Image (cartoon, grey):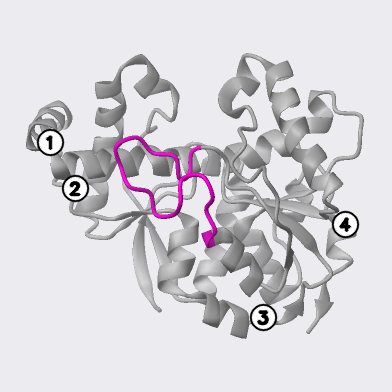
Amino acid sequence: MAATLAYYPGCSLKSSSKFYEASIQKVFGRYGISLKEIDDWSCCGASAAPTVDERLGHALAARNLALAEKAECDLFAPCSACYNRAKVTNEMIRSDADLQKEMNSIIEPLQTSASVEVKNIIEVLDDYVGVEILARDRKYDLSALKVVPYYGCVLTRMMRVKPYDDKENPESMDRLLFAAGLNVLRWPFKMECCGASKTLTNKDMTRRLSDRIVDMAIVLGADAIVTPCPLCQMNLDLLPSLGRTKEALPVLFLSEVFELSLYGKMLGAASHMIAADTLLSKVKEA
């Protein structure tokens, strides 16, 4: 279904995860979904700002929401942390007139009424394409690939806001991966923390947490881990650089799975720290 979405790339998709942005644009373009990057967007504060000052966290997100409203489109935030911050602030402003008034006084002359909907990549693929069309459009056979869906710890865990999927056992990405024709494995670590931004201040903690995730995926026989989150992808992909000496697994973005399904290759294959060559060799024409 053709649509235009206000696009909030966040810091990651303009730096360490540029290839995620390129992948999303390629897949979305196939389905007539255009992205209108919001003008003059700014950092949402991610997990740091609301920890220091909850009002600061809301103000940073509110500014971007106001810019999205000017674009008169729903807001698409592919980064899980950015999505979480925008979604929470949007819902709270919508239900709390005092908070809305306070935020608008801070971001003036911009104003937000929380009139947009905030969506992540899973929701966009579900709402604007659908599993039936994704399954029908497969051009390459991915059935030889065994993967585990890794949502990360912030995509559905939201305080005071109802998430789009179950907080502790989401299934929406699983359904999309099935639609792509993958062999999707059940596993208990889809919501485990990878260390998040601790990579900057405590690399050993990130390595320990991310090691557990990869170890479990390997025990289950997975060929790859699939995630919608740029921070999760980066932490797991960096494991050899953080000191992991055991086997590691390729970590794909959700959009890259559909690149494989539609085109048999990924634009950002060379940008992966952990090579995906073995994975790509299992992709066959349907």
Residue 28 vs 223, above or below: the answer is below
Q: Does residue 86 appear anywhere in the picture?
A: yes
Whole-percent x and y of residue 89? 27, 38
* Mark-to-mark CA distance, 2 and 3: 37 Å
* Residue at (73% x, 17% y) in the render: 204
Type of amino acid under label 3: Arg
Judge the density around disc 1: few (<14), some (14-19), many (≥20) Cα neighbours within 10 Å.
many
* Mark-to-mark CA distance, 3 and 1: 45 Å
Q: Circle 2 — which element? A: loop
Checking the image for residue 114, the label placed there is 2
Checking the image for residue 138, the label placed there is 3
| Direction from residue 83 to residue 147 in the image, left or right | right
Q: Which residue is mark 4?
A: 277
Q: Contact, CB < 8 Å: mark 4 with mark 3?
A: no
Q: Nearer the viewer, residue 94 or 157?
A: 157
Residue 202 vs 156, above or below: the answer is above
Checking the image for residue 135, the label placed there is none
Q: Circle 1 — which element? A: helix
Task: Identify the main secondary structure in magenta.
Answer: loop
Q: The magenta stretch spans which residues?
A: 154-172
* Mark-to-mark CA distance, 1 and 4: 50 Å
| Direction from residue 14 to residue 82 in the image, left or right | left
* Mark-to-mark CA distance, 4 and 3: 21 Å
Judge the density around disc 4: few (<14), some (14-19), many (≥20) Cα neighbours within 10 Å.
few
Total marks in image: 4
Q: Mark 2 vs mark 4: which is more N-terminal?
A: 2
| Direction from residue 29 to residue 106 in the image, left or right | left
Q: Does residue 111 appear anywhere in the picture?
A: no
